[in-house]
Image (tube, grey):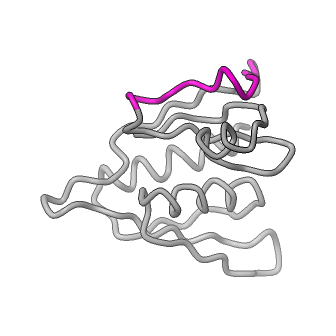
Amino acid sequence: MDTIGDFLTRVRNAGMAKHEKVDIPASNVRKGIAQVLQDYGYIRSFKVARDGKQGVMRVYLKYNEKGTPAITNVQRVSRPSRRIYTKSDSIPSIRNGFGISIMSTNKGIMSGDAAKEQKVGGEILCKIW
């Protein structure tokens, strides 16, 4: 099962349904993706609640003054059946700088811009705009 794709789909569907928040099972990769989304202003915040198992992450979504979600589109790039890796000098620009790519590098989950600055490559997880 694609847990990252499940996370992105839940966030996208909750935004389209105009929900204030969405609950998702927590993992370290999902926390990293949520942190990047919060840093770039695509979500308001997120919290991780511990239960007896893996924990639950509550993501608070962000909307503009017209009520449209901050996340308009999500594309899963690297899938379990096909992994996409890139070097630091060939990280793609998303929508001419109006979107972000989220990458898994050896220094953790980060945006494509941060990976370019630190000159690290890795697996491109998704594109968001």
Q: Nearer the viewer, residue 21 or 122?
A: 122
Q: Is residue 87 left or right of residue 68?
A: right
Disc tally is: 0
Q: Residue at x 67, y 31 (%)?
A: 124
Assess whether residue 112 is covered by the magenta stretch. Answer: no
Q: Position of residue 27 (x, y in %)?
A: 75, 60
Looking at the rendered image, the quarter that the N terminus falls into is top right
Range of the magenta residues?
82-96
As drawn, the residue found furthest toward the left would be 66
| Viewer-side residue, 65 vs 2 | 65
Q: Position of residue 83 (x, y in %)?
A: 76, 22
For residue 64, above or below residue 16: below
Could you tell me which residue is drawn at 57 percent across and 31 percent down? Answer: 76
Residue 71: image location, x then y, percent: 37, 48
- 110 left or right of 100? right
Q: Residue at x 80, y 68 (%)?
A: 54
Q: Residue at x 50, y 28 (%)?
A: 93
Q: Is residue 55 above or below residue 96?
A: below
Tell me if residue 124 comes above or below residue 42 in the rendering: above
Q: Quadrant of the C terminus?
A: top left
Q: Where in the figure is residue 28, as x and y percent of width and height?
A: 77, 60
Q: Quadrant of residue 61?
A: bottom left
